Amino acid sequence: SPVLVPIFGDQLSPQISSLADRNPDDTVILIMEVADETTYVRHHKAKIALILSAMRHFAGELRGAGWTVDYVRLDDSRNTGSFTGEVLRAIERHGPRGVQVTEPGEWRVRQAMEQWRIDLPVRLRILPDTRFICPLPDFYEWAAGRKELRMEWFYREMRRKTGLLMENDKPVGGRWNFDAENRGGPEAGLKPPALPPFAHDAITREVLELVSSRFANHFGSLDNFNWPVTRADAEKARNAFLQDRLPLFGKYQDAMLAGEDFLFHAALSPAINIGLLDPLDLCRRAETEWREGRAPLEAVEGFIRQIIGWREYIRGMYWLEMPGLADANGLDAHRPLPDFYWTGETKMRCLADCVRTTRDNAYAHHIQRLMVLGNFALLAGIRPQDVADWYLTVYADAFEWVELPNVAGMILHADKGRLASKPYAASGAYIDRMSNYCGSCTYKVKQKTGPEACPFNALYWHFLARNEKKLSGYHRLAQPYATWRRMSEEKRAEYIDSADAFLKTLVPAKPGWAR
Ligand code: FAD
Ligand code: DLZ
Ligand code: SF4
């Protein structure tokens, strides 16, 4: 009898480890559309459409390569709605001698899978996900000996391990990190090239219809749906990025321009995360762009650092810190998520534009997620679990292993600094420097307090003041705390009153948006 190989919606890679030692003659691949996965949070419509369309296309790709694929559709009347139920049903259909699967990306699914060991009538084999460059045991070993788990040190080891941008054990260009060159603000007339358009084939059209009727009340729009859903399209998206945007990726990495939703970013995270692009292969191609003189080193190093550095480090931290990370609330933040994260209805121009691109594209670029949406949640003291639910719901690339460490660690400091060396708190001046939002905002970025002042300004001091006991020991916050202490009593009171008055105006989100 065959071996049954379930493949999940973020495992759409022919080189997935669960298939590595299989051959088509005695293998049945099981791909399942299940209600549990489409609704464990109320994902953005475009995220569901992306994953279902990519799963259906992947089934075709596998069949074309000679594999037997048993594909369960969402609208199949016998569908039990869960991975566990569908694996059990498939065992009845195929009578396999064993089940073999690649470890899932999320803790939630891993827990369910541990139960399979007990509940399945056949042997279960769980294999590591070799699409990640750093195996989890290696990450745990790296972390074990260290007091501080800084990304930069991990990144250097990954450069050595992969040989990317290395020459005789030394970083090319004489430095590991060219971030200092990557701080360009927006320039007038900056016109980033458009992303390549992807026509919707019959499979995608059918999925778009299914999603717009079945998930009509989920957040987000399908009108701009343009994510690559096949390997060929993902490769086209990749090639367009390498050619058109990588050369300026570094320079404008931290910039924000109203209405320019992708700038020089890759927009490849959904394709990478679901398995349509291999991260290491992508980095090697980026390196070639530098070696052949088509892209500058600071751009290519910056891009490679995001993938073999940040992405791998974040994934290691997720498994290291779970399950506690999901409940972490180191700064005791308890305010509910404001409604404008869903509606976009706020006079704060920066936030309104970031929510708009999130709704239109199921995407916002990194600096919008970090310094606008994330910074606001940090300064306003929003409950980490509300913030995590929001990020997990709204982005096409959102899987808990990558979303949660970014939210709880990178933006909210809920993990007490395990991940980031200080909170990324910033006032309006930072957003003004890196964007063109403030010029046309109702609020005045240069005004510090009062109803017309940019709310980020007073919130910044409110945040530092209310967390003084927890944060004043941070070396990197010594300067702002010194400034705060030098201010007159009166000035400090003005900041606190101004922030409190603003916080009172926030309307909490109605329940039911995310869960
Ligand atoms: P680029 O800016 O072009 O970067 C290239 C690639 O580097 C990305 O495709 C991604 O694979 C990787 N990368 C860059 N930064 C990170 C990072 N901090 N963590 C992990 N990978 C990174 N990314 C997700 O894939 N899924 C998420 O759910 C997610 N949630 C986030 C939540 C917050 C609060 C923050 C601050 C960041 C989050 N990120 C997440 C990371 C990052 O913002 C996105 O990967 C990036 O915006 C995707 O767009 P891009 O492909 O254009 O990225
Ligand atoms: C996100 C998602 C959605 C919306 N739907 C499915 C699905 O129907 N079937 C499936 O296999 N995967 C889906 N996914 C992705 C899974 O949530 C993801 O693979 C696991 O959470 C990883 O542990
Ligand atoms: Fe955002 Fe403040 Fe600038 Fe308005 S003034 S866009 S709220 S940073």
Image (cartoon, rainbow, N blue to C red):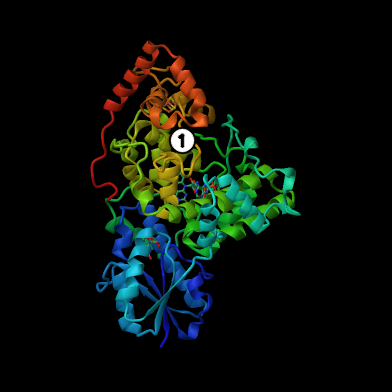
* Residue plotted at (55% across, 63% down): 232
Image height check: is 315 above or below 345? Answer: below
Extreme residue toward the bottom, this view: 1
Amino acid type, label 1: Pro
Report x, y in % for residue 83.
33, 68
Report x, y in % for residue 194.
55, 45
Image height check: is 270 above or below 423? Answer: below
Q: Is residue 33 visible?
A: no
Between 450 and 401, the one nearer to me in the picture: 401
Between 424 and 230, the one nearer to me in the picture: 424
10 Å crowding of disc 1: few (<14), some (14-19), many (20+): many
Q: Is mark 1 within 8 Å of ligand 1?
A: no
Report x, y in % for residue 43.
34, 53
* Residue plotted at (32% across, 81% down): 121
Quarter for ligand 2?
A: bottom left
Q: Quadrant of residue 7?
A: bottom left
Which secondary structure, mark 1? loop
Between 261 and 390, the one nearer to me in the picture: 390
Report x, y in % for residue 379.
39, 31
* Residue plotted at (48% across, 54% down): 315
Q: Is residue 423 left or right of residue 82?
A: right
Q: Quadrant of residue 59?
A: bottom left
What residue sits right under mark 1 in the picture? 423
Q: Is residue 182 left or right of residue 325?
A: right
